[in-house]
Amino acid sequence: METKRLYRSRTNTMIGGVCAGLADYFNLDPTIMRLIFVLLALLGGHGVLVYLILWLVVPLQPEA
């Protein structure tokens, strides 16, 4: 059984690939994940902080 790992996307990036990587991990559309981060950013600014932390912590997807 293959374990599921969280990576930043190399192919579906807007800024850093964080939202696309999270969307792949949770089987969501990347646009939905991006909207969630925008809403978090507008409702107190936490979305920006979480995004930056994830950008630094989550590794980039390995090349195929």
Image (cartoon, rainbow, N blue to C red):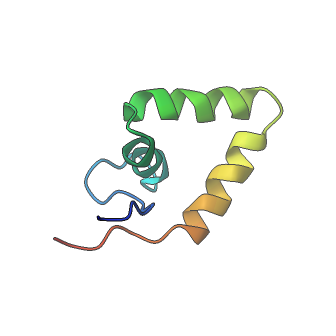
User: Residue 55: x and y, percent?
Assistant: 56, 62
Q: Nearer the viewer, residue 49 or 59?
A: 59
Question: Residue at 36% of width from left, 46% of height from top?
Answer: 24
Question: Residue at 53% of width from left, 67% of height from top?
Answer: 58
Q: Residue furthest left?
A: 64
Relative to 10, say whether 46 is above or below: above
Position of 31 compared to 37: left or right? Answer: left
Q: Quadrant of residue 38?
A: top right
Question: Residue at 30% of width from left, 47% of height from top?
Answer: 12
Position of 19 compared to 45: left or right? Answer: left
Question: Residue at 67% of width from left, 61% of height from top?
Answer: 53
User: Residue 21: x and y, percent?
Assistant: 41, 52
Q: Quadrant of the N terminus?
A: bottom left
Relative to 17, say whether 63 is above or below: below
Q: Residue furthest front?
A: 1
Q: Quadrant of the C terminus?
A: bottom left
Q: Quadrant of residue 39?
A: top right
Q: Nearer the viewer, residue 5 or 50?
A: 5
User: Residue 4: x and y, percent?
Assistant: 39, 60
User: Residue 33: x and y, percent?
Assistant: 50, 34
Relative to 42, say whether 19 is above or below: below
Relative to 29, say whether 12 is above or below: below
